[in-house]
Image: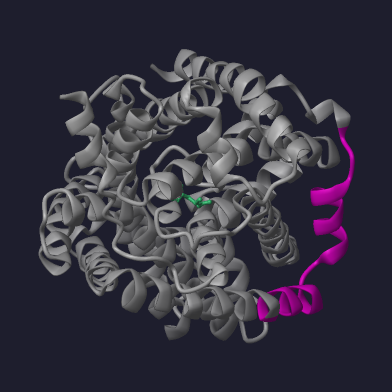
Amino acid sequence: MQQNQRMSIAVRSSSGVWGSRTTFVLALTASAIGLGNLWRFSYLLGEQGGAPFLIAYLLCLFFVAVPVLVAEVLIGSHGRSNPVSALLYTSARSDITRAWLVIAWIASIASAIILAYYSVVAGWGLAYIGKMQSGVFSDASAAEVGRVFTTMLADPQQLLQSQTVFIVLTFTISALGIFRGLAVLFWFSIPLFLVALGVLVEYSLLNGDVTQAGEFLFSVNTYDFTAESVLLAMGQAFYTLSIGVGIGMAFGAYAPDKIPLGRTVLAVALFDTMVALAAGLVIFPIIFAANVEPAMGPGLMFVGLPYAFGNMVEGELFGAIFFITITVVALSSAVALAEPVMSYLVERMRLRRPVAALLFGTVTWFVALGCALSFNEWQDVYWYQQMTLFQLLERVSTVILLPTAALLTALLVGYCIRREILRVELYRESRLFIFLWRFCLRYIAPPAIVIVMASALLEKF
Ligand code: PHE
């Protein structure tokens, strides 16, 4: 019986292989670069002490997040199929319990939840392209700019319109498939993003307050750097590499043979960090030039920045470019987020891709509707301890599901999988690399993840 089961699992069913290593790198990069790089990293850097925070972040990135992402990609690449099948295959090959499958379920649920609320925020970005360009913010006062944002949030119809456009775009691309949809988007979106980022950095350095931004971002303030800063650095490292949501497995399934998985992931992490730093160079000179208090999250993105752009030369144009950039980046992350569940529906449920996209897109739309209503009609409806649906979904996914999936992945690959599998999948990496990677997975990542999770849970649940 067990033999039979293994035989059937052994028929791996990947829908293909990325055309080249570059596409694979672009895919991982596209899922990594997102709102986290734009509205969170640089603020934390400035607020949490500068250089010491950067060092803490890099340590968490390279010793915890990167090893976990390598482990995820390895499972996908070994199983050559959706996260569920890949985990079944990998555990069967290692003669261990198939209960590890639970990782795929947790990760898939996390990805679906994140996709829903990500679409809501991405919809705001989409709406702001038009607003910015129309000149609503030109010479507007800070209060007026704030009012535009609150008025938008209070209007369910407006929110619904833009998130519907975003969700339709996401699932149309996803329906086109890995090669005609995702790969084409990534080849187009990453270069476009880099050009736009370059243009914005130049604009900001020319017109913004570079000295003050430099002081904010890079001066060393050890007294601002606390234990909490380390936790924030770790959380940021996890979130930015998009670990724990099954993307690494889903994309690893299409990784071309013979690529050095470890070095590829390392390169993606480095690049992602450089992008996050560059985003800081766009945002803070502009913010300081307009005398706006630095902040992070929606307040920075949808109030502080539009106000600052509105008061600068050619701010409408560059502001619009900024919001186009955000939308493109969010779209790439969203398409990546849809992939773990999409590949499951196509490969295991045997649905055609367009049908799967329609089905999953509809579910996402309804959950996103609930999230959008959290800002108006359901503003006072608390689903759990004073949290609106939007807040609850955001917390549950990032504080519980995502770290749990990452933790289990580290334990599975660090302790349970056959060594030969690791050696085969990582055969292009040096022995030293494999040793260090395994060491991190076994001894560093698990306690680090538990500490972050426990501290976050104590704070809010
Ligand atoms: N990595 C993305 C960012 O930095 C966010 C993300 C998290 C995307 C999890 C997909 C999955 O914004």
| Horizontal side, residue 129 vs residue 190: left or right | left
Q: Residue at x 32, y 29 (%)?
A: 92
Quadrant containing the N terminus in the rendered view: top left
Magenta segment, which residues? 199-221
Identify the main secondary structure in magenta.
helix
Where is 359 relative to 449, above or below?
below
- In the foreground, 47 or 114: 114
Quadrant containing the C terminus in the rendered view: top left
- In the foreground, 142 or 447: 447
Q: Residue 253's spot in the image, x, y percent?
A: 40, 54
Q: Residue 275's spot in the image, x, y percent?
A: 67, 61
- In the foreground, 311 or 121: 121
| Horizontal side, residue 339 vs residue 168: left or right | right
Q: Residue 292's spot in the image, x, y percent?
A: 66, 57
Where is 189 relative to 247, above or below?
below
> Does residue 449 belong to the magenta stretch?
no
| Horizontal side, residue 205 vs residue 87: left or right | right
- In the foreground, 85 or 58: 85
Q: Is residue 193 visible?
A: yes
| Horizontal side, residue 9 vs residue 47: left or right | left
Q: Is residue 364 visible?
A: no
Q: Residue at x 78, y 41 (%)?
A: 54
Q: Residue 35's spot in the image, x, y percent?
A: 51, 55
